């Protein structure tokens, strides 16, 4: 199990973030009835879809699980069965074994004296599987979960698959966003709510990074104002990636909201780059190849293994992007 140690003002929490908020608020007792095999154990499970968008093609499909007692189910063995829906008809298209990922949620807080603290916000868990949707429209997934000797009754949830994703598509040119850098501010804290920030992630604009002829990692995350409370853990993973690849790869961290307005309590207003990249949620991590095209993208949760597996092929300059298999 892996462990992670629009225009205008955003006034409503997107559905997948609302789902995460419910999960975060749930008690951390595990499955109803526990793992002890109590014959009276509650065996119903409620899946909640984490993705803010699903589109035709390859997807990282993510759900969270709640028991009928509104308790989060973490570390289960989970199987997905995907159906294409057509009125009352449904056709099984694909099955997948999910990978459980445990999240240690965090957020940062700035005190009046300027001191920045990182606070824990409990643990959560998601279940991840790679799935390919071959047509748009209404789909469904049946979820079967087992924790120790407690097997939950299968439960289903429907969702919509789009013809094209709202966020910048795989293989598309990366938007040439003119983001803020250290040259635009007196203190890195003006453009980064991480604790601690990495100034080297703010030396290039996105436009400069993706036109440099080197691969780039672009992360949109706000540890202080993240609605899902998973920006901090995701940023930590990218920070670890930076330490390994900083000599070969450009890294750009973008706060997705205008920090002055967020810190004043005015609200969460997306910066231009957030809109240009088609993002309605956070965090997101994008890998851009040396030719300036989107090679991989990860919403919400990402592991170091996923990032390194996608990034390493981009470092081989002798392999053209059309043959890298992403």
Image (cartoon, grey):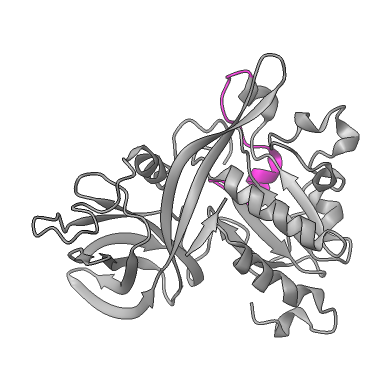
Instruction: Point out the image quarter for the C terminus.
Output: bottom right
Type of secondary structure dominating the magenta stretch: loop
| Residue 293, quarter of picture | bottom right
Q: Is residue 321 left or right of residue 21?
A: right
Q: Is residue 179 left or right of residue 307?
A: right
**Residue name at image x 50 percent, y 46 percent:** 104
Q: Is residue 75 left or right of residue 187?
A: left
Viewer-side residue, 145 vs 57: 145
Viewer-side residue, 281 vs 245: 245
* Residue found at the far top of this picture: 112
**Residue name at image x 59 percent, y 38 percent:** 7
**Residue name at image x 57 percent, y 30 percent:** 268
Q: Is residue 200 magenta?
A: no
User: Considering only vertical position in the picture, is 270 above or below 46?
Assistant: above
Residue 212 in the image: state x and y as whole percent: 89, 61
Viewer-side residue, 51 vs 66: 66
Q: Is residue 39 visible?
A: yes
Residue 150 in the image: state x and y as whole percent: 21, 64
- Range covered by the magenta-colored residues: 264-282
**Residue name at image x 65 percent, y 82 percent:** 325
Q: Is residue 130 left or right of residue 26?
A: right
User: Considering only vertical position in the picture, is 185 above or below 50?
Assistant: above
Q: Is residue 162 visible?
A: no
Residue 309 in the image: state x and y as whole percent: 65, 73
Residue 222 in the image: state x and y as whole percent: 63, 39
| Residue 74, quarter of picture | bottom left
């Amino acid at each position: 199990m892996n462990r992670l140690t629009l225009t205008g003002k955003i006034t409503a929490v997107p559905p997948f973030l609302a789902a995460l908020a419910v999960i975060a608020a749930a008690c951390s007792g595990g499955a109803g009835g526990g793992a002890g095999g109590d014959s009276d154990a509650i065996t119903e499970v409620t899946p909640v879809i984490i993705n803010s968008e699903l589109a035709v093609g390859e997807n990282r499909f993510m759900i969270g699980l709640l028991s009928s007692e509104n308790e989060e189910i973490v570390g289960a063995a989970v199987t997905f069965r995907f159906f294409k829906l057509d009125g009352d008809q449904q056709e099984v298209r694909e099955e997948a074994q999910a990978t459980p990922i445990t999240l240690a949620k965090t957020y940062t807080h700035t005190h009046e004296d300027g001191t920045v603290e990182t606070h824990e916000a409990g643990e959560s868990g998601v279940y991840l599987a790679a799935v390919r949707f071959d047509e748009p429209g209404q789909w469904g997934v049946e979820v079967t979960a087992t924790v120790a000797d407690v097997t939950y009754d299968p439960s289903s949830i429907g969702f919509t698959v789009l013809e094209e994703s709202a966020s910048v598509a795989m293989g598309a040119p990366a938007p040439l966003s003119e983001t803020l850098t250290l040259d635009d501010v007196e203190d890195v804290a003006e453009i980064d709510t991480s604790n601690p920030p990495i100034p080297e992630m703010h030396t290039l604009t996105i436009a400069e990074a993706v036109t440099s002829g080197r691969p780039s990692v672009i992360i949109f995350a706000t540890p202080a104002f993240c609605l899902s409370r998973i920006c901090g853990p995701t940023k930590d993973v990218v920070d670890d990636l930076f330490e390994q690849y900083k000599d070969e790869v450009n890294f750009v961290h973008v706060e997705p909201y205008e920090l002055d307005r967020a810190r004043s309590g005015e609200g969460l207003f997306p910066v231009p780059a957030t809109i240009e990249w088609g993002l309605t949620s956070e965090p997101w991590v994008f890998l851009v190849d040396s030719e300036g095209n989107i090679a991989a993208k990860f919403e919400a949760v990402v592991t170091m293994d996923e990032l390194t597996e996608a990034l390493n092929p981009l470092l081989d300059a002798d392999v053209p992007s059309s043959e890298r298999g992403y």
